[in-house]
Structures are given as C-alpha cells and as structure tokens.
Amino acid sequence: MHVPFCAVRCHYCHFSTAAFSGDAVERWFAGIEREADLRAPLADGVAFTSLFFGGGTPSALSSRHFRRLWDLLRARFTLAPDAEVTLEANPESAKDALLAAWREAGVNRLSFGAQSFEPSELRSLGRIHDEARPVEAVALARAHGFERLSLDLMYGYPGHTSAAFARTLARAGELGLEHVSAYCYIPEGVTPQGERALASGGPAVPDEAQAALYEQLSEAMEGMGLACYETSNFCRPDAESRHNLTYWLRRDYLALGPSAHACWRGERWGNRFATADWAAALERGEDPASERERSPEASTSDEIVMLGLRLSSGLRAADYAPSDWASVERRYGAAFAAAQEAGRLESVPGGWRIPRRHRFLADDTIAWLAARARG
Ligand code: SF4
C-alpha cells in the first residue's frame, strides 16, 4: 500500500511522492477505493499473511485518515489472523494519537526511517528530524506496546566516513531493535544529491569504500545480535520481515497506490508512477497499471535466482514449486557449477548460496550467473 505523501522531499529520494494537502489526500483516497475494488476479486478466498504500508510517508496520514484507510482495506480484503502488518514511519511523525490508532487497528510492526544519527549528515540528506527523534520514536513505540521495531539506515554516500558510521551504528545499537535495514547509497540523477554526486563523471563513492562500510555494518549488526538474512537486512532470530521475504522468495503479492508493483499468479504489473497520473487513470475507469507482463519460464527462473541469492540462507529447492525449480536447474545448472568452481557460490543442502565474504558483491555474482545462463 503506497502512501505517497511526504512533508518535504529528501535530497537522495526518487520514490513516488506527492505534496500533502486536504484535496490531494481525498483524491488519493478515491483512487485507492477504486483500485481496491478493481483488485479485490483477484484475491477472492485469499487470507493475506502480510500487509505493508510504505511510501512516501504512511505516518503523514492522521489517525482519522488511517482508520478510514484500514476500514476501506478490511472491507475488501481478508487478513490472516497472525498477519504481519508493517507501517513505515518517519520518526518526527510518531505521536501518541497515531501510535494508538495503529495499534488499535492491528499494526504490529513499525519501520522507522532514521538513515543516520549524525546532525550534519541528516542535513545533507535532507531529513527533517534531528538525531534525537528516532530514539524518542522508538521509546514511544515501545510504550505503546510495539514489539517489532525496525530502523532504516543508509551508508556509502559522498562524504560518509567510517568514524561517522561507527557513531551511527553505536546509537542504533542502544535501541534494542529487532530488525535493521541498511541500504548502500546509489546516486539517482533525478535527485539533487544524485546530480551533485554524478557531476564529477567518476563514481560518486568508490566501490571499495562502500564495501568497507558494509563490512563495518555487518560486524556491528553481529555485535547487536542481528544476523544478516538478506544482503541489506539484519534481524534477531525469527524477526525476519515477512513482507521482504515475500519479494525475495518471489511469492504472490498485490499492490495498491501510485508506483506500486504487483506479482500475482504468474503476472507482474507496475502502476503509473506519479500520483496524479495514477489517480486520473482510475477516474477514467482505466486500470492504473502502466506496465504489465506475463512471466515466461526463462524470466521466472532469472527472477528466482536474482532474488533468492540475496538471502543468506541461499537459493533452496524447498522454497519453490517443483516445476519452477526444475526450470532453474535447466537454465542455471551449468552456471551454478562454474560459479562453485570459481568460488562465487557454495552449495547448501538442496541449493546454493553466495559465500559471506562475497555478500556485498551479490549483484555482481548474479549478473555473472545470468550472463552464463543466457550463454
Ligand atoms: S520521507 Fe522517505 S519517501 Fe519521503 S522523500 Fe524522504 S526518503 Fe523519500
């Protein structure tokens, strides 16, 4: 569920966001209602095991708006009794009334965007909270009974140093979190920070420097008792994000809202990116998807390998339908053997994984395998 509104746009962000106003929220609600009506028949008889409110900034919605959204969804879709319900929140918007509304509705996991605990970095990233706010937000969420909390961090942006990252990781380590997502900075040309970073023509940050920061991150997470279960995600035992695993294990998911992407019964589609375009399509009675494809066997295998090898547990036959795994073996069998020979893959019972020392280079190994599979 993509909630596109943000108070201001962070300097590095290329997500689909929109300015917040009463009219904009009403138009978005009308669009969500139309799209929910359109998609709900696809999920007849399905009890969803995960619901994720992402953005944008879902916490930009008032408690009254959130209850309205919740009622709208629950009237059309079924949630499993033990469903994971996650909401992404910016630390500055975590207030008593909102936290109470989220808890009452059934949100059982919060993901706070912190990115850094360094005041100068927060300013240059364009974040509007100070370094104390995530700490207060976590304490407030705990006081409201939230037991599953995650924090988003970023590393490897221009000017990021190991010393500054150590201070951020130490502050994060004091929070007793169940989960941390830490993403390596990628300069996007359409953002102010990305434009600056790319202006020099060379790499914004050398790969070696980002790899060293990733190593520092991995060690700090281990020190916090959080194991890496996907390249960029760390958690306590049994605290993996079910939502994230849905993507990486290539399970079915539906999606609502501008720029939202779905993978459902062998078909993928992505909605129009801009909120106004998405809303206008629905107002005309059209499907808001701007791209749609049925996955042929080869691209299903490519996706399974590309997504599954990011998992620390590896790519395992037991996680897929036998016919899908047979396709993977047909297309990738020789490439897997060559990668093992080259030290890029190691075998695990019923599958393959990328060795820990190559984890940061997972995308590189995946591209290497895909080139050989296409052969
Ligand atoms: S709050 Fe999140 S979605 Fe909004 S601009 Fe910042 S990073 Fe992007």
Image: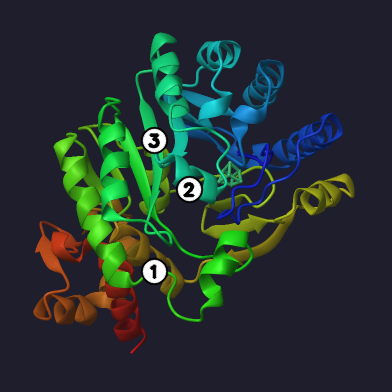
User: How crowded is the residue under tag 3: few (<14 C-alpha within 10 Å), some, or many (20+)?
Assistant: many
Name the foreground residue: 119 vs 328: 119
**Ligand 1 - quadrant of the structure image:** top right
| Residue at 10 percent of width and 56 percent of height | 349
In the image, which is nearer the foreground, mark 2 or mark 1?
1
Q: In which image quadrant can residue 348 be found? A: bottom left
- Please give the label number shown on residue 98: none
Indicate the secondary structure of the residue bearing disc 1. Answer: loop
* Badge 3 vs badge 2, beta-carbon distance below 8 Å: no
The disc label shown at residue 151, or none:
3
Left or right, 76 with reference to 219? right
Q: Residues within 10 Å of mark 1 (few under 14, many from 20)?
A: some
What amino acid type should be assigned to the residue bearing mark 3? Leu
- Residue at 45% over, 80% down: 202
- Count of marks, rendered view: 3
The residue sitting at the right extreme is: 284
Give the answer, above or below, for where 73 lies relative to 184.
Answer: above
Residue where numbered disc 1 is placed: 205
In 3D space, how far apart are the residues under numbered discs 1 and 3 (Cα atoms)? 23 Å
**Would residue 316 be seen by someone viewing this image from the given angle?**
no
Residue type at mark 2 is Asp
Left or right position of 276 against 140? right
Which comes before the other along the chain, label 2 or label 1? 1
Residue 14 visible to the viewer:
yes
Picture quadrant of residue 150: top left
Whichever of labels 1 and 3 marks the residue nearer the N terminus, that label is 3
Mark 2 → mark 1, Cα distance in angstroms: 36 Å
Which badge, 3 or 2, is on the more N-terminal residue?
3
Q: Position of residue 375 (x, y in %)?
A: 33, 90
